[in-house]
Image: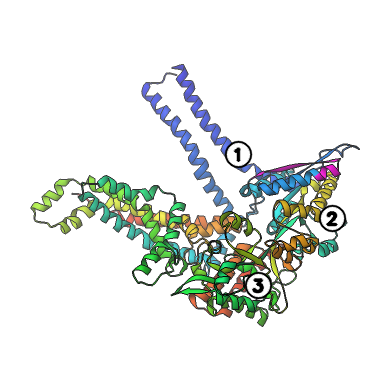
Amino acid sequence: MFKSRKALLFTFLLAALMLVAACTAPAAPAPAAEEGAAAEAPAEEAAPAEGEVIEIEYWQYNFGARVDAMNELIKQFEAENPGIKVIHNSDIPYDNFRDKIAASVPAGVGPDVATLFYGWQTAWIDAGYIVPLPEDAFPPEMVASDFSPMVQASFFDGKLYTLPTAVRTLALFYNKDLMEAAGLDPESPPTTLQELEEQAVQCTVRNGDGYDVFGFVVNPAGQAHHWFREVLLRQFGQQPYSDDYRQVLWNASQGGYDAWNEFLKFETELETGRRDLITEPDDFLAGKVCFHIDGSFRLGTIAKNAPDLNFGVTELPEYNGIKSTFGSYWTHGITTKAAADPARMEASIKFLQFITTPEAGRLWVDMVGELPAQLEAASDPALLADPKLGAFVAGLPYAHSTFFVDESKDRQAIIDAYDGVVLNGADPAEELDFAVQTVQEMLDEFWAGRE
Amino acid sequence: MKLTLHRRQILWAYAFLSVSLVFFVVIRWYPAVLALNISVRDWNVFQGSGPWVGAANFQAIWEDLFKPRSAVRAAFLNTFKYVLLGVPLQLVLALGISLLLMQIRRLSGFFRAAYFIPYVTSFVAVAFVWNWLYAPQAGLINQTLTALGLPTQPFLRSPQQALPSIALVAVWRSLGFAIIIFLAGLQQIPEMYYEAAQIDGANRWQSFWRITLPLLNPVIVYLAVLQTIQFLRMFDLVQNMSTDNAGGPLKSTTTVVLEVYKEGFSSYNMGYAAALTIILFAVILLITLVQMRLLSRRVEY
């Protein structure tokens, strides 16, 4: 009797406890975040005495090859800098990475140096996670001359915030067997837009309304929206955005409309394939597509899922004598936590300098397969001669990254404009105008919110 | 204090109920209240806070409703289309199949199981299977059409066909649930009503209209309300069946919940997304109340 009453009480208590625990837990990070922002994290620890070892933390999300490569870099760095110890935290799964950062950095704990996608940079700056890199350690002129031009996307409001070890670019994949079957020379894939058009037409095999072989399909939901913004527009003489990224310029000149028509032409005029009939990139892997635009990251997918595919990779076709490609990258920043303590800041700068050298880039390409961010690599004959990586490396000197306010909405605007033309038969120029208006509104809202 | 046996039993009941109540409070109510709070703020996900902006998020939604090619307007219109297409089809099909199932004796267990299995299958798995069935060129449906000499259809890739194609899968997926409920309802109707009607010379059609349907009314109301709510919250299938640009092509399949998801977790407009959920909640509440009032007539014999 007595026992059961105790058990009863216990059950109620358990319920109450669960309620209390559950209600306070999710609310906790909020006040912590405010405190962190207001108090600027006072330097709790005194500056370390001479000869003492400084510990800094480095964070990245968990991806096998990247973790191994960074472990190797840290080993080398620590050997060179005995006074600094780098703690490598790579246990965080990709999906939780941003949440973890959000929960720790504002509270003054977590990484001193962290790796982020270049597209997240503005959000991280706004949230106050990362600080500008000091100009004496990372001169803007050095970044401009030594790094691929795409790294300019790491500058925000004139200040450099992050720097990458490695980058990715787009290139043209081609199926050698299909080219041969169509009577094309598989060793001379298209080098110009004109050649791409001709070879794609020749490679296409129709089957009633459908296709047995797609010559070339423009799929804005895949990588092709980048091809339009950073490649076609530039080749037709129209830069995609104003230098300060406040204006969308896709339709600012006849060149913009011409680039748009070139983009649509493969489906509407040349009929080398239909976006609504293709599954990307699966159909290329299945050997049903002749030419396909994709990133260096696809090489791994192909090696794993279609090891027998007889394909090659070449640079994106040029036009008007202009070569261009789109690049994107994971980049490293220094957090507000490091900035709060001069000694840790100094150590973090040294570490960041070390992991962004050409040597680090070379180690990275060997271990991870991503391209070195430094232009030096683009003149490395061994890399350029690589039958698969060579075309991507060759793109480094002319690769551009887009500053996105919201990549998925920007992409959606191009997808909708494309579908409007090919599915609903709408006027191409009107569709482009509407896409520009949509993206412009997004930019306006973004910049208005920052003033 | 001395507790009687009865009192102790009641106390135990409350004790157990309180544990599950915690689950409801924490997992259901607390986030709902939180959403209300977020909907009146300019919420920053990264900081987990945001300044009070009053009805600004709601006003933004209102303005977006009238913009050309508005995604929010498309979402609301599509959501209603899913309901208007899906719920009646669901009810008619399920009732028809249940009536047939009542007729058979042999293999009736097998048939019931066969119809119910999709209901216990995950939405995502269902979506993937149907993606293959609907696939252009190589999909099973299009292969069949080709074999029959009929023109192939774009299905999910067409702004006109995509929504009905997805609605059909949603109907198919939860048909089993509606059938089980209908079967339970049908078995509740006493056999003697039908016998009496037969003696009075009523044919089967008349028995159906005068006995089965009126007596099934509570079941129909229950299912109609439940399925309407189900279709109003349409998300999983759309997200997974219009893969390369969720809600497309050309916003033709997007739903309110999908827009909530995209605004909240892809564009990080948490305040806007939360405001949308509040509006959806109000819409669901209103429609449910109207339905219950309109559909539930008391039938007495």
Q: Is residue A366 above or below residue A249?
A: above
Q: Is residue B260 above or below residue B68?
A: above
Mark 2–mark 3 Cα distance, whole angstroms, equals 47 Å
Callout 1 crowding tier (Cα within 10 Å): few <14, some 14–19, many ≥20: few
- The residue type indicated by label 1 comes to Thr
Q: Position of residue B259 (x, y in %)?
A: 53, 60
**To which residue does mark 2 refer?**
A134
Counting residues from the N terminus, which is met first, the one under dot 2 or under dot 1? 1
- Can residue A220 be seen? no
Q: In the displayed structure, does residue A414 sit left or right of residue B17?
A: right
**To which residue does mark 3 refer?**
A188
Counting residues from the N terminus, which is met first, the one under dot 1 or under dot 3? 1
Asked if labels 2 and 1 share a chain, the reply is yes
**Residue A179, located in which quarter of the rendered image?**
bottom right
Mark 1–mark 3 Cα distance, whole angstroms, equals 65 Å
- The residue type indicated by label 3 comes to Ser
The residue sitting at 23% across, 46% down in the picture is: B187
- The residue type indicated by label 2 comes to Pro
Q: Secondary structure at mark 1?
A: helix
Q: Nearer the viewer, residue B272 or B259?
A: B259
In this view, which residue lies farthest toward the bottom? A254
Q: Which residues are magenta?
A: A76-92
Q: Nearer the viewer, residue A114 or A442?
A: A114
Q: Secondary structure at mark 2?
A: loop
Q: Position of residue A313 (x, y in %)?
A: 65, 65
**Residue B79, located in which quarter of the rendered image?**
bottom left
Q: Position of residue A246 (x, y in %)?
A: 71, 70
**To which residue does mark 1 refer?**
A24
Callout 2 crowding tier (Cα within 10 Å): few <14, some 14–19, many ≥20: few
Q: Nearer the viewer, residue A387 or A70?
A: A387
Query: Residues at badges 2 and 3 in contact (C-beta under 8 Å)?
Result: no
